[in-house]
Image (cartoon, helix red, strand yellow):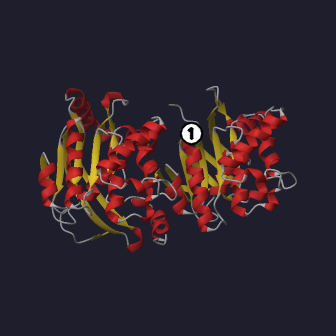
Amino acid sequence: MKPLMSARHLTKQYGGRNGCRDVSFDLYPGEVLCIVGESGSGKTTLLNTLALRTDADGGALTYTDANGAALDLLALSEPRRRMLARTEWGFVQQNPRDGLRAGVSAGANIGEPLMAVGARHYGRIRETATQWMRRVELDAERIDELPSAFSGGMQQRLQIARNLVTGPRLVFMDEPTAGLDVSVQARLLDLLRTLTTTLHLSVLIVTHDIGVARLLAHRLMVMQGGTVVESGLTDQVLDDPQHPYTQTLVASVLPV
Amino acid sequence: MTQETSNLSNTAAATRAFVDNPALMLRAERVCKTFTLHGQGGIRIDALSGVSLDVERGECVVLAGPSGAGKSSFLRCLYGNYLASGGRIAIRDDDAPLQHLDITAAEPHDILRLRRNVVGYVSQFLRVIPRVTTLDVVAAPLTVRGVDEAQARQRAATLLARLNVPERLWSLAPATFSGGEQQRVNIARGLIAGHRVLLLDEPTASLDAENREVVAQLIDEARGRGAAIVGVFHDEDTRNRVATRIMTMNAAREQAPITEPA
């Protein structure tokens, strides 16, 4: 099996600091890879660099597209990057308001990405949007309401529907459960778990929450000061952490 | 990489072992495990110092020895849950070149595949997933392999019934179940996929005699199918009932922690 995405010595610096340095990994189809670390560790910078939202300063990044072609992402032209982001990728923001369009209805928020890849039949788009509302456990009766009429947890599920409706192969998520009530968080985690398994999605997810990582991820990368200090299978990294920082991180989790 | 080079002759020997002996399922060679507690002044604790074990198809090797002898640590190393600090662990893997995977040197991606297809692990406790029903928790190891959902649930129902988990509980998430019920759900989940290598860490710890006997029968049946089993059982009756061989372990050197040289 070929990796879906391969990073080698990927580096992003802001004036020589605060970025990510020398990151290498292979992500395979169907794998959920979690990037954990505290604020300022460079995990969001890494995610944005991988999703081509910020330009890398060095290293290599390869992606195998739906046709099996290996693309050198750092050399890809801007129109092709945008095409890739629209057709094969999703990006779920920490704050749903950043990932949704406030001025249009819930149904339009889900339908828009479909129109961007060429869907034109209004009835079918609405039908698909209705199905996705149900799939992310939203009341389909509320399809014509604006995002602002929904609670934070519901908005996050709406954002997930908007990102998955086009059937992406790779989804980036930046702290998707942060800022939600614990009970709302559990429901969202369970939903994400089910969707990633049934849709056979590959996911790169950034979180500072070890519990989220334990529940969702197959593999972990632990970041500190812009570098990956430890990586491996989720249960191995959490049950037998090797690096001093990872040991502190795991020991700091309050028992439930 | 340097370690890989120095182990080249050993690797060659193990390669031949899995090709030459079709019954060999697992080979652990001089496995060591040392925990370094960086938060506590770099104290090092030796859990395993050079444990070796071969397990063949149809065997059930029970690990015995006093508490602190490293039985659970060894099982966890075999599963890749703990990183071995030294030695080698190879497990039969028909999808790998030369019919085995060296899990002490493998990529996470390959260990995930091995866990899906070859190695199953039953711990003492069920790691509860919120909101997922008991039936789906048990069926999951089959569905991730691509088995049809209805068929997987059917198999899960059969196993849960055999383990005397009341049918009214099947559609509930196991978070609120009693310790014994959770443990039986965990066993059903661990055994459903018919893994060819099974690692069992005190799977009968909180079960009554009747259910311990059901588990013992399921272990016998797994052996009959050709599974290779390594287990830890705290009660002597179950241990003697299921074991084809007993390996006694002793605490690694002495228990006194060694301070990391500065």
Along the horizontal axis of the image, is A90 left or right of B36? right
Q: Which residue is mark 1?
A: A200
- Residue B58, by quadrant, is top left
Q: Chain of mark 1?
A: A
- Measuring from the top left, give residue A99's x and y in whole percent: 76, 53
Please tell me which residue is depicted at 67% across the width and 37% down the height of the picture: A167
Please tell me which residue is depicted at 17% across the width and 41% down the height of the picture: B59
- Residue A180, by quadrant, is bottom right
Q: Element type at marker 1?
A: loop
| Residue found farthest to the right | A103
- Measuring from the top left, give residue B242's x and y in whole percent: 16, 49
Query: B178 above or below B62?
Result: below
Please tell me which residue is depicted at 50% across the width and 31% down the height of the picture: A1
Viewer-nearest residue: B253 or B100? B100
Q: Residues within 10 Å of mark 1 (few under 14, many from 20)?
A: some
Tag 1: amino acid: His
- Residue A98, by quadrant, is bottom right
Query: B117 above or below B75?
Result: above
Query: A60 above or below B134?
Result: above
- Measuring from the top left, give residue A51's x and y in whole percent: 69, 45
Q: How many marks?
A: 1
Along the horizontal axis of the image, is A146 left or right of A95? right
- Measuring from the top left, give residue B136's x and y in whole percent: 46, 48
Along the horizontal axis of the image, is A201 left or right of B181? right
Q: Is residue B22 visible?
A: yes
Along the horizontal axis of the image, is B80 left or right of B13? right
Q: Is residue B1 visible?
A: no
